[in-house]
Amino acid sequence: GLRQAGLSSRLILQVHDELVIETCRDETEQVRQILEESMKQAADLAVPLEVYLHTGDNWYEAHSCRAAGYRQTGPLTGG
């Protein structure tokens, strides 16, 4: 997880299957990798879990990618 990796980035909000992570810019790529792996392994299912990760300077910007129909793998919000 983030803490075990010694990162400054922190989970600040979880709503259902969506996470909001406050991330230091220099940790973004490492946080992406940790979150994607963690979320893909969150449940043992017969089909793989899809993970959509979006970045932005705030929640609105991160969600604007989804609203515009973009699919970007990576974090600040995941869900």
Image: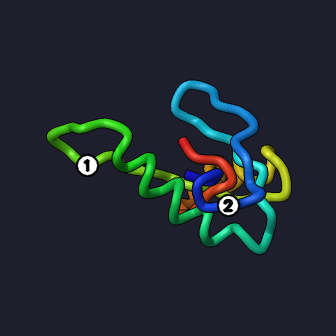
Quadrant where the C terminus is found in the figure: top right
Instruction: Residue at 37%, 49% (x, y): give it.
Output: 40
Which residue was labeled with disc 2?
6
Q: Earlier in the sequence, mark 1 or mark 2?
A: 2
How far from the left and from the top, in percent, is residue 41?
A: 34, 47
Q: Position of residue 23 (x, y in %)?
A: 76, 57
Residue 72 sits in which quadrant? bottom right
Is 38 left or right of 9, judged from the image as shown? Answer: left
Q: Position of residue 11 (x, y in %)?
A: 69, 42
Q: Residue at x 62, y 57 (%)?
A: 75
Q: Secondary structure at mark 1?
A: loop
Crowd band around label 1 with a 10 angstrom C-alpha radius: few (<14), some (14–19), many (20+)? few
Question: Which residue is under mark 1?
Answer: 48
Identified at 62% across, 72% down, the residue is 29
Q: Amino acid at mark 2?
A: Gly
Label 2: few (<14), some (14–19) or many (≥20) C-alpha neighbours in 10 Å: few
Rounded to the nearest angstrom, the CA distance separating label 1 from label 2 is: 29 Å
| Count of numbered circles on the image | 2
Secondary structure under the numbered disc 2 in the rendered image:
loop
Residue situated in front as seen by the camera: 2 or 79: 2
Across and down, in percent, residue 71 comes to: 52, 60
Residue at the top extreme of this rendering: 16
Q: Residue at x 58, y 46 (%)?
A: 78
Inspect the image, locate mark 1, and give the three-letter code of the amino acid beneath it. Pro
